[in-house]
Image: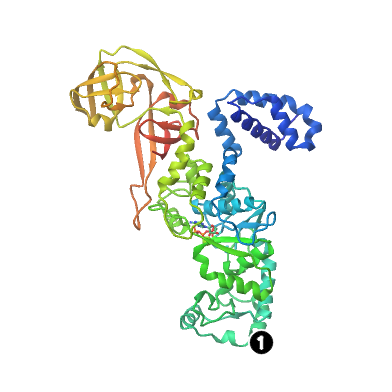
Amino acid sequence: MPIDADTEKFIKVIALKNSVEHDGKAQVDAVIAKFIGSKPELRSQIKALIPEIKAMVHEINAISVADQKLLLEELAPGETAAKKRTEQQLQLPQLEGAVHGKVVTRFPPEPNGYPHIGHAKAAIIDEEYAHLYAGRLILRFDDTNPLKEKLEYYDAIAEGLEWLGVKPDIVKNTSDDIDLLHNYGRKLIELDGAYVCTCSQNTIHDLRGKGLPCECRQDPAIALERVEKMFGDLYDQNEAIVRFKGDMADQNTAMRDPALFRIIEGEHPKLGNKVRVWPTYDFAAPIEDSIDGVTHALRTKEYELRNALYFAILERLKLRKPHLIEFSRLEFEGIPVSKRKIRPLIDNGTIKSWDDPRLPTLAAFRKRGFVPEAIRKFVLSLGFTLAETKPPFEALEAFNRKIIDPISPRLFFVKNPAEVRVQGAREMEVMLKNHPTDATLGTRKVKAGDLLYISGDDAANLKVGTEIRLIELFNIKITGVDLRNGALSIAAKVGDDEIRQSMPKVQWIAKNDIVEYKVLIPKELYIGEEYNTNSLEIARGFAESFVSRLKPDARVQFVRFGFCRIDDDQTAIMTHR
Ligand code: ATP
Ligand code: MG
């Protein structure tokens, strides 16, 4: 029976979960039982599905537990971490006024760039709260500026969240509600809560500074006359804006008649040229939150001064008010998170793509070999502080290392290779373990003889008489160190076989086992306020030929070098040390 892609994926996930819980062997009966339990509506078709299920279980049982886990993480991100969820949720404080089953949160990114780790923080917290209270999460593309937004970015955000394992219950765009937003704008003017201002930008700026009203504000009759012209699209760009009637003398400058609508000419990714009058974030956010049924709107602390405006708009329109809650923005030292810092580097061509491994975008983290589960754990470990602390990047790396260490095969890579001639070494075949503790990751056979390579850095430390251990091979004693054509060349003889504490233990590659290989190493993107021109190091050298058997996306730990993600058959990207 032909089986649709969704059902196939669903069964695969069940089988993978079953197998990782049972030492890598899924059981057909258990998978069938679980399937019927979760999809009773398909019970009648189960007979026809059984051969498919059997084949899938067979296929899954044939691969290592480590690969099963990876595949599971790929198909159902977060599933392997699902058990730990409840533990993590406890770190989030209770939400004021939250009622079980009724909480609605929302994540409102503007589709004006690729999602980054800061968005991950916001989206994960929104989702965790929705889950904690058995509520719902809305993903709302906050798309009210046609000059900045692109379809590519909506897709990138959706993909980034999917990779993270954040599953919104509802997906919508602010622009879907443009007519409604216009109507609320008109209504607010009719209620004398807003007016159309035709002053120049300079005048507006000046009077705002001085805390003085302009003429447009004085006469409600003028505002009413201009309403039709504004929403009837009869003004030119920059000729008029709609402003909230706040208090021009308010201590909180956000209340000094901020803009609610402005005219922007440009092709909108969803609405084309149909609309010219666009709401600002200040207007769209409260209305959308209110009409979408959001109960708890979480946003970063820089919006704090705008909270009064958020509530004032809803108050005048007699709309329901959600709870507003602030949390701190996530930033790292040396890796600015904001799109404001990333975009110029992309626009001027310094950085070619949004998934460049130096960037803090989700696409880049993925490309470097981070697992979404680590990002979630890291974000939740930060808790819910308002303090603008910059956590060390190493904290995120530590979460990731803990997850990938047990599933990454160990291989050798030697950077800037130095030749080692070992006098008296017999040709021999050694069996190397791919992982020190997990035998399911297998072994590899390497033929080693009297010509080997070690890394240039290790070679540079050698002197005649030094004894070193070639890991899992034998000891050698250095008899000569030469510089030939700019590269070190070492002569040695085979030593004894005792492994002593004091000996340097170095990785090596056998002469006939070489793949020319490079590793991209992302470094800090900025030093202070300056772009770091050395932010991408390329380490070149030799890897063992076994590396060719790893497919793109596979993980590896190059011994004494670092964890990497395989990018192509000659390139890996360093995840972290
Ligand atoms: P950027 O400065 O990168 O453009 P933004 O705040 O303009 O960020 P939006 O797309 O408008 O980006 O943000 C969507 C949501 O993500 C908002 O609720 C915002 O508060 C949150 N967010 C953005 N950056 C961070 C960050 N660094 N840390 C935590 N949350 C963030
Ligand atoms: Mg923004």
Q: Is mark 1 within 8 Å of ligand 2?
A: no
Residue pictured at 50% horizontal, 85% vertical: 212
Would you place residue 134 above or below residue 328 in this image?
A: above
Amino acid tagged 1? Ala
The residue tagged with tag 1: helix, strand or loop? Answer: helix
Q: Quadrant of residue 12?
A: top right
Q: Can you give x and y, in whole percent of width and height, for residue 573 in the image?
A: 42, 38
Q: Can you give x and y, in whole percent of width and height, for residue 238 in the image?
A: 55, 75
Residue pictured at 57% horizontal, 49% vertical: 89
Quadrant in which the C terminus appears: top left
Residue 389 at least partly seen: yes
Could you say which is closer to the camera, residue 497 or residue 257? 497
Quadrant in which the N terminus appears: top right
Could you say which is closer to the camera, residue 178 or residue 188? 188
Would you place residue 521 above or below residue 17 in this image?
A: below
Q: How many marks?
A: 1
- In the picture of the structure, the residue carrying the numbered disc 1 is 221
Residue pictured at 70% horizontal, 67% vertical: 180
Q: Is residue 228 left or right of residue 515?
A: right
Could you say which is closer to the camera, residue 482 or residue 368? 368
Q: Can you give x and y, in whole percent of width and height, for residue 209 in the image?
A: 46, 80
Would you place residue 480 above or below residue 319 in this image?
A: above
Q: Is residue 418 left or right of residue 222?
A: left
Category of crowding for the residue at label 1, using alpha-carbon neighbours closer than 10 angstroms: few (below 14), some (14–19), many (at least 20)? few
Q: Can you give x and y, in whole percent of width and height, for residue 221 in the image?
A: 66, 87
Q: Quadrant of residue 517?
A: top left
Q: Is residue 396 left or right of residue 498?
A: right
